[in-house]
Image (tube, rainbow, N blue to C red):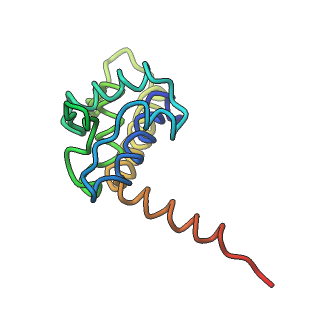
Amino acid sequence: MELSCKCEYAVLALLTLVEHYRQGDPLQIRQIAAQQHIPDRYLEQLLATLRRSGLVFSQRGARGGYLLARAPWKITLLEIINCIEGRESPVPVSPNPNMTLEKVVVQEIWQEADQAANTVLQDCTLQDLCDRRDVKQQIDLMYYI
């Protein structure tokens, strides 16, 4: 499995919004884009998709921008990926009489792998990513004499 560029940008934008979640300060597209090196126009489209799915909301006005719609520990990576990629959980494919036994076995394993990936993504929230980032920053700041 590989994370698409769209999903990566969406997650990076949301992580930027997490940093400002407690203050309740909305961030403008250009601020997020500059911090994460995402093209403005592309980010605008991604945020519109995230807004339609209820992951962020926008605030109009001079101090307007985007905010997380829910707490970071309530937004899972699976939810973000499904929003951006427009996919839902795959429906198990029932074998047809023309399928070889090998094809059936391969499909079953592929479905198991997909389910395992979905479980990991469902268990990981934006807050978990922030916590991991913070731990890595602390390790990078440590020095030894």
Residue situated furthest top in the rendering: 98
Is 122 located above or below residue 5 in the figure? below
The structure residue drawn at horizontal position 46% and vertical position 26%, both measured from the top left corner, is 103
> Does residue 90 sit above or below 74 in this rendering?
above
Residue 51 point in image, percent of width and height: 23, 31
Quarter occupied by the C terminus? bottom right
> Which of the 4 image quadrants contains residue 111?
top left
9 to the left or right of 67: right
Q: Report which quarter residue 42 is drawn in.
A: top left
Q: Nearer the viewer, residue 49 or 113?
A: 49
Q: Position of residue 102 (x, y in %)?
A: 49, 29
User: As drawn, which residue projects farthest toward the right?
Assistant: 145
Residue toward you, 75 or 121 = 75
Q: Which x, y percent locates residue 125?
A: 34, 54
Judged from this view, the residue extending furthest toward the bottom is 145
Residue located 36% across and 23% down the image: 44
Percent from the top left, x then y, of residue 127?
35, 58
Vertical relation: 132 (above or below) 57: below
Residue 123 shows up from this direction: yes
- Asked whether residue 105 appears in the rendered view, the answer is no
Please indicate whether residue 106 sits to the left or right of residue 138 in the image.
Answer: left
Q: Residue at x 35, y 52 (%)?
A: 18
- Total numbered labels placed on residues in the image: 0
**Could you tell me which residue is drawn at 34 percent across and 52 percent down?**
20
